[in-house]
Image (cartoon, coloured by chain):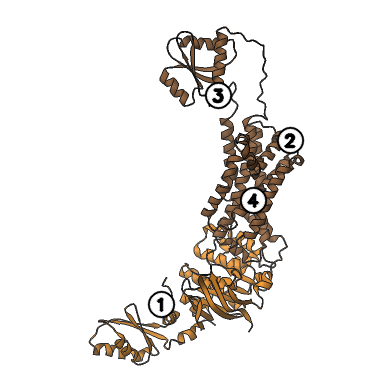
Amino acid sequence: MTIAVQCRDLRKTYDGKVEAVRGLSLEIQTGECFGLLGPNGAGKTTTIEILEGLLQPTSGEVSILGHTWRENKRELRELLGISLQETRLSEKLSVRETIELFASFYREPRSSDEVLEQLQLTEKADAWVGKLSGGQRQRLAVATALVCNPKILFLDEPTTGLDPQSRRQLWDIIRAFQRDGGTVLLTTHYMDEAERLCDRLAIIDHGQIIAEGSPGSLINRLGGHHVVEFAVSGNSDGAALEAWRSLPSVESVREDDGMLALHVKEPHLTIPALLAAVAMRGRELQHLSTRQASLEDVFVQLTGRHLREE
Amino acid sequence: MSVAQETPAASVKSPRSQAARRNGRWAGYTHLLMARMRELKREPEVVFWVFVFPLLLALGLGIAFRNKPGEAASVAIVAGAGAPETKAMLEGSPHHATFKIDVQNEATAQKGFRLGKYDLVIAPDGRGGFQYRYDPARTESVLARAEVDDALQAAAGRKDAVATTAVTSSAPGSRYIDFLIPGLLGMNLMNSGMWGIGFALVDMRQRKLLKRFVATPMRRGDFLLALLSSRLVLMIIEIALLLSLGIFVFHMRVLGSLFSIVLLGAAGAVTFGGLGLLTASRAQKIESVSGLMNLVMMPMWIFSGVFFSYERFPTMLQPFVKILPLTALNDALRASILEGTPLTHQWPRLLVMLLWGGISFALALRWFRWT
């Protein structure tokens, strides 16, 4: 496989003070869907805009499809489809007019009808952009990126603020693009989106990559695929935490908002022992649930914070 | 592949095989210009401010300052002894002047005078003499005093020492509306040039549309050229509307060639387009650019002779007034429209505009922020 996007030791400092990106290196293979996952303000947008050639890095190297922005700007622009976070397209133009406008910038664009059909916007072709729903607007934004038949698709928070159905529609479109051989780089702060869509992802916090790999391998690093969450009466302390840790099949323990979370390999071994331990200490079980471990758990374990804490 | 386990994606046929068309060199420019014109057409506020508002302004001012036939001085005679006689003297005077005469009590007459209803108050002293009350700072008041005095003296038997005759002139070409229409045209070219370019740019920057555009292979020069071209198209409509109003409603005479007027309009549109571009080259918010625009345009509204001649300003201000681009444009438009002066005799004015436009453009391109 060839490398579609590569950057080395990327740094971006705003006004000499705010360090948005602090030494970030990435390699994205052709045909991959790669995700930058992180909370708001982690430096995702700055990173993707540097890769898109819209921002100058303070230092570091970027190479897209083997070209640099300095040398092959115009050529690169023909090959990339970009959707920014929150672009407000002209409200008084129709969907078709907007797509045609963007198509006119490229040497060999696709036909508008085809793009309209792919993005399920054919019915809305003659509607003004101002009249579209949030999901339709976002699909139009992606349409303006796909109109050039890009090799790489950059999407900055493509589904933020959308309803579940619109999100799924967009995911389908992104997958279809990837199936046809396209490379995708997207940013998101939705862990489910990263988990379902991305082949590989980098978790970003404070302008740095704190973990990288496929969603599965990241979750594997937790040790247990399952999470047992419970709450008991009475106070808990360090010693108690140690006691829960020693239950069978438990890989790690953390306390989270008054709730205890055990990362567990085999819940059917842990739960009976947990119940017995609670009873033995004369405590009362106030809550018990189990679920699959997610990227959220990975992020919490790495940073001690939740993704959505803002 | 991904860990996703959901219903298969809505099958999308591979579109990559067929390259639909090839775009020529000017495809981007043409589409940008078309998009801009469509947006303007669909924006009712734009249509109002660019086209309807100047017409209303011209119509309103034209009516307010129209040359009233026999513009009669309006005078009040204070009621009391001698009042009816005074009125009779004025009306029967051999001196041919018409007055609008009211007999009012003291208070009403004074109030009317203060409010500008009366230009002059005549108070007969009851012994055959008169007291005039007038305001030396009001032209029409001074005029009324002189005319009333002449009329009363003539009625009382004064004879003119020399014979005089007068020829009146209120032919098109020298009325206020003739002065006003080219001024409004100039001001309108400034307003819509500055707003049309500056506001549009900052709005697009704020919406991150500029950033989205530069993320495509769009040529930046084409984008600015399209914006400017849209101004030129609007300029022609603006000129056509205002001149038609002048010609058909106020019977204005246009002496210069239409071609030279349109050429001047184009020079104005480009000049103020450049200024608009410069004003908007860095602003991130509509609010900040609005203030900046007003700051730039304010001196020209006042000094550039839109509504009244800038000759009224002190001599020491004249050089400053004359280098303003709107002064140059207004003077050039007036010379072309009212006097038919050919453009070849107007090169200093054209040079002033060219310099403003050119320097603004050059600076704007250097400072311009796309993101």
Q: Which mark is residue B273?
A: 4
**Would you say A16 lies left or right of A111 here?**
left
Q: Earlier in the sequence, mark 3 or mark 4?
A: 3
Q: Position of residue A60 (x, y in %)?
A: 59, 77
Q: If the image is split into quadrants, where does the C terminus of chain B sit?
A: bottom right
User: Judging from the image, what secondary structure is the residue with disc 2 in?
Assistant: loop
Q: Position of residue A73 (x, y in %)?
A: 67, 70
Which residue occupies 67% across, 39% down?
B331
**Would you say A192 lies left or right of B168 here?**
left
Tag 1 near tag 3, CB within 8 Å: no
Which residue occupies 46% across, 25% down?
B114
Disc 1 designates what residue?
A: A305
CA–CA distance between discs 4 and 1?
52 Å
Disc 3 designates what residue?
A: B140
User: Judging from the image, what secondary structure is the residue with disc 4 in?
Assistant: helix
**Would residue B13 be visible to someone looking at this image?**
no
Label 4 is found on which chain of the structure?
A: B
Tag 2 near tag 3, CB within 8 Å: no
Image: A25 above or below B101: below
User: Judging from the image, what secondary structure is the residue with disc 1 in?
Assistant: loop
Which residue occupies 64% across, 29% down?
B175
**Would residue B19 be visible to someone looking at this image?**
yes
Q: Earlier in the sequence, mark 2 or mark 4?
A: 4
Question: Which amino acid does the dot numbered 1 rest on?
Answer: Arg
CA–CA distance between discs 1 and 3?
81 Å
Q: Which chain is orange?
A: A
